[in-house]
Image: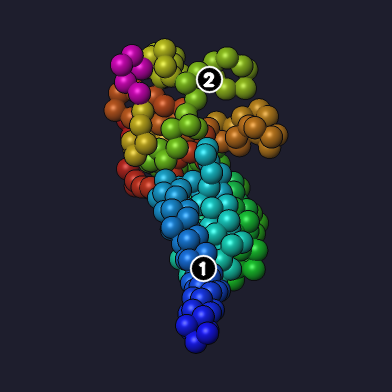
Amino acid sequence: MISLKQEDFTMHRYFFFSLIFSIVLIPIHATSSPLPDVSQLLHQCEKHFQANRLTIGRGGTALACYQEVLEKYPTNAEALAGLENIEARYAKWAKKALERGQKNQAKRYLDSLRKVNPDSPTLVKLKVRLAATSTSPPVTSASSSEAILQRKAQIVDVGKIYELINTTNCLTWPRPDMKKKGGKNGWGSFYPKKGDTGIVVAEKQHCRAGNTGFDDSIYILKVGQYYVPISSTGALVVISENSTTNE
């Protein structure tokens, strides 16, 4: 009789500790399992950021990626810092564009900055600066052309390159010599790549600028001996020379 009671006690103790194990340890495992997923997602966010796919880009953007992390983990420090970095980069680009008198490009950067943080104090300050430049006396066409010749830009998105621009009346080559060594018909074995820097020898307005799918400005970059048409959204003006070029 005593032996049976001892067996019952042992059996009850076994089930008791099994229950404790399932209650305590299983939730711990379930809580820790998503961590590798968020780590991989944050890594992808950083790749978007480094490639300047901030709010627009093929295959995802840094903004959407960090927002996805914050939907699952609202206090994730790395995702919050990522949004601040995107905001800072757009603010930096907008300031440079304003310093060079590129009002349209500055406006685009500010529109993107607004998507990231509509309450940004920097956004308010830069909008004031942009409004001030809009009330300045207009620049003559001669001085405007000179300013274009003094700029250099770096290709940041090869997907924004126009391989052909003579297919419509909207975009045409400014000069025959540019057409001869411009676009895929004139490049031969050459093809521009991300990071290439060239002189902005011309800037054209698309006749459908402002419509969905069409860019406001197209740069003609001289990269080496070749000419590369690219949307202004795919190139970053990085240098402003004081001396004119031979173009």
**Of residues 162 and 173, which is closer to you in this image?**
162
**Of residues 217 and 87, which is closer to you in this image?**
87
| Majority SS type along the magenta span | loop
Residue 88 location (% of width, % of height): 48, 62
Q: What's drawn in magenta, residue-wise? A: 187-191
What is the quadrant of the C terminus in the image?
top left
Q: Secondary structure at mark 1?
A: helix
Q: Disc number at residue 165? A: 2
Q: Disc number at residue 26? A: 1
Q: Residue at x 35, y 32 (%)?
A: 193
Residue 21 location (% of width, % of height): 49, 73
Toward the bottom, the furthest residue is: 2
Tag 1: amino acid: Ile
**204, above or below 131, in the image:** above
Tell me: 102 left or right of 226.
Answer: right
Residue 80 location (% of width, % of height): 51, 67
Sequence order check, earlier mark of 2 and 1:
1
Q: CA distance from mark 2 to mark 1?
A: 62 Å
Q: Residue at x 54, y 53 (%)?
A: 65
Count of picture labels: 2
Tag 2: amino acid: Ile
Closer to viewer: mark 2 or mark 1: 1
**6, above or below 59, in the image:** below
Q: Residue at x 57, y 14 (%)?
A: 167
Q: Residue at x 36, y 47 (%)?
A: 239
Residue 49 location (% of width, % of height): 45, 52
**Of residues 234 and 199, which is closer to you in this image?**
234
